[in-house]
Amino acid sequence: MQTYLIRGGTVVDSTTAGRRADVFVRDGVVAEVGDALDAAGAQVLDAEGCVVAPGLVDIQVHFREPGREDSETIESGSRAAALGGFTAVVCMPNTMPPIDDAAVVEWIVGRGRDVGLCDVRVAGCITRERAGRELAPLGELYDAGVRIFTDDGDCVADANLMRRAFEYSIALPGAVIAQHAEDPSLVAGGHMHEGEWSARLGIPGRPAEAEIVIVARDLALARRTGARYHVLHLSTAGAADLVRRAKAEGLRVTAECTPQHFTLTDACCADYDPSFKMNPPLRGADDRDGVRAALIDGTLDAIATDHAPHAPETKAVPFEDAPPGMLGVETAFAVAHGELVGSGQLTMQALLARLSWQPAAIAGLGDRHGRPVATGEPANLTVLDVDRHWVVDERAVASQSRNTPWHGRELHGRVRHTVLEGVATVIDQEAVR
Ligand SMILES: [Zn+2]
């Protein structure tokens, strides 16, 4: 097996905010961490001026396979994720067929393993066929390795079904019920955040209250059942406040937000560019600022991308006809680093908590991912060139799709190398396979 010496970097993980050290990788694990280690025939990965960190973990991606391989495949998505510093991802179950039985779980996870660029895991459906009518076989999915259950893409609107999913999940250690929190009756026909910009542009809106009422309802059910609850891509200050209070009360609740929701606003839709269309939508500045404050104060546990590729022809249509979703895995670290660390709002260690070990814990991946960079630990690592500035070019992405909201933007910080289970997947910003 290949051996590597990651030389000259600064290690940042859950145990250290920064310590200069070389990292020797052999047989899939971190074999040694120390000063001026001897390369001893290993391939040297230069990390001068870089941060050496546990691999990033994205608990919300859409790799579109099976069903929409024209938009993304497990291979193209895994390559994009590796280039973004991720060593593990959790694919949402809105594939075709949806992930509502063990056979689909095993097929996707096996395909991810064959590709070998990222540890590809899946979330399972809460309801059969994501149809919102009856529970999916949660126990069967759990036995196949599923820990996150969600109908993402759609909200579980039926409160009683949600209650039964919570009750069922209690018997499954480590399982969590995750919600795409948008009340369908409030967002029906809407294509962007309901506010000043939707009125000005003449585009029907999706109000913030659609998220707030679902999160409030689900928290009441989580309180009643004692089950774990996770809010996907939280986008409003109101829902963040509810999560903050629920945590203070001791409920078993976690939440995530996307880089776009703490950075961009609905004003981005002014040119009717479908690259800025997603669900939940980009909100106004007050919500954007509230989400960012909640991410900084720890109310939100994780940054997830909701990486949602759409083949170019499907997005090359009028705003209202375009499918919602944005690319995210190749830019997440750079956006978050520039916005939060570059501005002094988070330390590097606090940022990595939200991009690595905290999402790993939510998804039940903490045994292999987000581990300290220490002897004997699985070598799932990323090397981050924190001084690097670069400009996003939609033509240069590894994803099969082009729908990035960051095209033309200068970002601050870039993934230099990624190592998965002791094997380099990215060296000097190039995917190895
Ligand atoms: Zn969603």
Image (cartoon, rainbow, N blue to C red):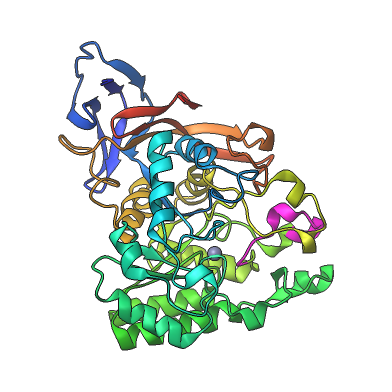
Q: Is residue 31 above or below residue 290?
A: above
* Near-viewer residue (285 or 393): 393
> Residue 223 in the image: x percent, y percent?
33, 85
Quadrant in the picture for residue 270: bottom right
Quadrant in the picture for residue 177: bottom left
Left-right relation of 127 to 353: right
Magenta segment: does it hold 231?
no
Looking at the rendering, the quadrant in which ligand 1 lies is bottom right
Left-right relation of 90 to 32: right
* Near-viewer residue (270 or 272): 272
Range drawn in magenta: 269-280
Q: Is residue 427 above or below residue 257?
A: above
Q: Let me know if residue 195 appears in the view.
A: no
> Residue 285 in the image: x percent, y percent?
63, 67
Magenta segment: does it hold 274?
yes
Residue lying furthest top:
41
Q: Let me know if residue 8 appears in the view.
A: yes
Q: Is residue 216 above or below residue 383?
A: below
Q: Residue at x 48, y 58 (%)?
A: 92
Residue lying furthest front:
103
> Residue 346 in the image: x percent, y percent?
41, 53
> Residue 427 in the image: x percent, y percent?
43, 24
Q: Residue at x 69, y 39 (%)?
A: 408
